[in-house]
Amino acid sequence: MTTSQWGSIYKDLGIKPIINATGSVTALGGSIVADEVRAAMEMSNDVYVPMSELEQKAGGEIARILDVPAAYITSGAGSALTLAAAAFMAGSDDDKIQQLPNTDGMPNKILIQKRQRYWYDRCMEFSGGQLVEVGNEDGTSADQLIKAINEDTACVHFPVYEQKEIDDNILSLEEVIEITHSKNKFVSVDAAGQIYPLENFGKYVKMGADFQCIAAKYMGAPHSTGLALGTEEIIDAISRHSFIGYESRRIRGIGRPHKIDRQEIIGVVVAVKRWLSMNHEERLSKAETQTNTIFNKIKNIDGLQVKIINNIIGHQPFGLSFDIDESKFGINNESFVELLKNNEPSIWTRVPDGEKSIVIHVFGMNSKEAEIVGDSISKILKDIK
Ligand SMILES: *Cc1c(COP(=O)(O)O)cnc(C)c1O
């Protein structure tokens, strides 16, 4: 592709293409569909199949590959969370499925440890449930969770971020599973990004959780797809609440707006197979090289504190963080992020929520773009001085 063609399909609409230095974020389009995934989607385009059979066989194949009891392909991990919450509340009862989001007569409380509240937990409420915090800012004890679980409890929800430090103030997933199951309630896990190391992919269901989601946006599938993994009981219920149930069974469940196309379903199957068989050393080494490319171009700039991020867990390996010395350049990190956006070409990165430094991830970059990012940071700072 020549530079003039770069993003021309967007330019035709009057949109300026950007270099994605943020990583796999929905606001910038999530991810690039891998070549073999795109080829498989293309092959599935000109033929029709019964969608319920496709969902069932595709889910079965993924469950077999991941060695979990059952799986279902959804329109994103967010959709998997909403459908799972519906399954925890209404199960497979068609009357209840059609009653949602009115939860009268059903257990509808989704428990979550206070310190685990996070951006996507709202997805657990869209089918009519209600989040209830357990414990407080200081933490949650076993006793607090035991007391909080009652007949109104639909499930206990637990987000996992294995790349972050362990929080000793909260109950671990093992403890949550033990307590929740001793009270005959379900455990739900958001493991959207836990796809590497490969043994983490599907691990939480194997540990005993009734459900976990995966965001397929992180592994070369269409950005709009995701996976529900879980017990046969919960996955079967999810399929009944889904858009398939609405159409094939003529049961008006809440899943109708969570539609996913047959090309996407095929794409997810191929993306999972590709992810499990690809050379991850090569993937990591490419991310490390791109990170070093940027690092080497900016490491010696006076007034810039740069650190390499060495994490390889999850979907977004390596990257770097840096801070602008305000007393030297007269601007802070936030204004520098704006300068990068206004750069030619435009480079998007951010100071992530709850952090202070600018963070760059190479997930959404090719090697040429990594060079441009390093050169642009260096040039902007030179021009300020
Ligand atoms: C991205 C993400 C989601 C939402 O996934 P979508 O596929 O975009 O709906 C949920 N939870 C976590 C932790 C995520 O990273």
Image (cartoon, helix red, strand yellow):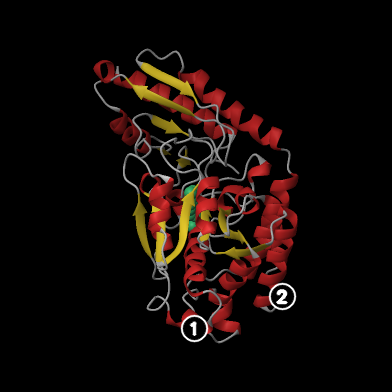
The answer to whether residue 302 is above or below residue 155 is: above
Q: Which residue is mark 2?
A: 47
Q: Residue at x 61, y 67 (%)?
A: 235
Residue drawn 66% across and 70% down?
55
Where is residue 331, by image quadrant?
top left
The answer to whether residue 228 is left or right of residue 50 is: left
Image quarter where the N terminus lies is top right
Q: Amino acid at mark 1?
A: Arg
Whole-percent x and y of residue 162? 54, 39
For residue 53, side relative to residue 94 (left or right) = right
Q: Nearer the viewer, residue 16 or 229?
A: 229
The image position of residue 37, as x and y in percent, is 68, 55
The quarter of the picture where the C terminus appears is top left
Q: Position of residue 360 (x, y in %)?
A: 46, 33
**Mark nearer the N terminus (1 vs 2):** 2
Element marked by disc 1: loop
Q: Is residue 229 above or below residue 330?
A: below
Q: Counting other residues with Cα less than 10 Å from the Cα at mark 2, is it few (<14), some (14-19), or many (20 or more)?
A: few
Q: Which of the pair 178/128 is nearer the observer?
A: 178
Label 1 CA crowd tier, 10 Å (few <14, some 14–19, many 20+): many
Q: Residue at x 55, y 31 (%)?
A: 311
The residue that label 1 is drawn on is 252
Name the foreground residue: 158 vs 364. Answer: 158
Look at the image and tell me whether residue 9 can be seen.
no
Q: Is residue 312 left or right of residue 118?
A: right
